[in-house]
Image (cartoon, helix red, strand yellow):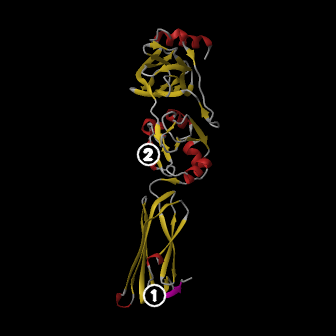
Amino acid sequence: MNNKIKSLLIIITIMLSSFSIISNASIIKHSIKQDVVYKNTNKQIYLGYVKINGNGSNSNLEAVAKNNLLVDIENKTDYVDFYINYTMNCSGDTDNGQIWLTVAINGQNMTPALATTFNIAEGVLKIEDIQVNRKDGFQFLIEVIYANVIPLYTNQTQAIGGGFIRKSTKLIEKNNIIPYTTFFTNITAEEAYNLIKSTENLTVVDIRGLEGCGICQFNHGHLPGAQRNDNPTTLYEKTTDILVYSINGSVGVDFCLDLLNHVYGKIYNLIGGYNAWVAAGYPLEGSPTYLQIMNLDSGLGSVSVEIKNIGSFIARDISVEIKVVGGFFSFINFTSSCINCENSLEPGVIKTEGSSKDGYIFGFGPIEITVSAWAKNAGIVTIKQEAFIFGLIIVIKVSGYGDRYKLEGK
């Protein structure tokens, strides 16, 4: 695009803008590297988001503003950063998108921030280092403008929100004041896996709903113990550590920023998101998965069996039931069960379950062994096997070549 067309587009969008102070606007760019720990002494105040999709002759604009925000500050006077997230896709040859953010404290306008692009861009638009006092009220205006020169086409929308500044409410435990968390840490898939394994009461948050069909993605696989959450405010005042993951990690950064100064535990963002976790080969939870009953074995007055997870997702709350009936005069009626006996079983992993914990099997004559296994997210599987018992010695029948029996005791 030549400079004349660019200049014309800028003139058109400025004329469309409703701000009286737009001539004093400053362009503020903000980016975060995923391989560093993000720290900022200013409180981060998330105001909303903007999406622009245009192809020259038509466009779809979306501006969402948060309202009735309650912002806690520790001191009577403090400094804050106001910000919104945005994505702009201007796919035409002669089009331009612009986003203006203006904040007013007690009716006094701050210098607005501008984001503009002639192609594709995403990021955070921020007004930084704004001094606020307790009991201050603030309002903000988000204005979105899309313009094209050939053919001449314009579209615009806006969103208005606001809130109040108040005294910080902190968690008080045993007369000690615990401060809010003021930074988050980016971690790799390996570090996230170890964190999940080693941290009790870790809150794992799946935010892929902010990027598409969250429930569809969640049901097809998610990190162990994860919960769907598209709204960071529902986690405010939480005391446990929080691990956040999006599809590729970028949206997770914004979500973590919104948690700063609102939670008490550590905050982690998974670098590369869900895609990095899958690429590293770490296990997923989902529905359904599948179990297989493997080797049936016998010991002295007992029976054991191997259960394998042959599905793609972690099996949760494994249950196994071993039932032995028969013998002369149907003397034997023995059941050994373990309900929710294993919290989880990862794909490809085998679990062994035996009957000895519930006592000895004793009798004489032919018997039938029935084994059933199921999980919270796996259907029931059952096998039946003929056997013979001599007191405490169990001989399991081998299929094929007539009626043969195999001593399986160890």
> What kind of element bears circle 1?
strand
57, above or below 317, in the image: above
Residue located farthest toward the right when viewing the structure as drawn = 35
| Label 1, residues with CA under 10 Å away: few <14, some 14-19, many ≥20 | many
Asked if residue 340 shows in the view, the reply is yes
Cα–Cα gap, marks 2 and 1: 50 Å
The residue identified by callout 1 is 388
Task: Point out residue 385 in the picture as x, y percentages from the top left corner.
Answer: 45, 79
Task: Point out residue 352 in the picture as x, y percentages from the top left corner.
Answer: 52, 71
Kindly identify the amino acid type of the residue bearing the numbered disc 1: Phe
Q: Nearer the viewer, residue 54 or 361?
A: 361
Task: Give whichever of discs 2 and 1 has the lower sequence position.
Answer: 2
Given contact means CB atoms under 8 Å apart, are the residues at marks 2 and 1 in contact? no
Task: Point out residue 138 in the picture as x, y percentages from the top left corner.
Answer: 43, 19
Residue range corresponding to the magenta coloring: 402-407
Q: How many marks?
A: 2
Kindly identify the amino acid type of the residue bearing the numbered disc 2: Cys
Residue pictured at 39% horizontal, 88% vertical: 327
Which of discs 2 and 1 lies nearer the camera? The answer is 1
The verdict on residue 403 being magenta is yes
Q: Which mark is residue 216?
A: 2
Residue pictured at 46% horizontal, 76% vertical: 355
Residue pictured at 53% horizontal, 18% vertical: 113
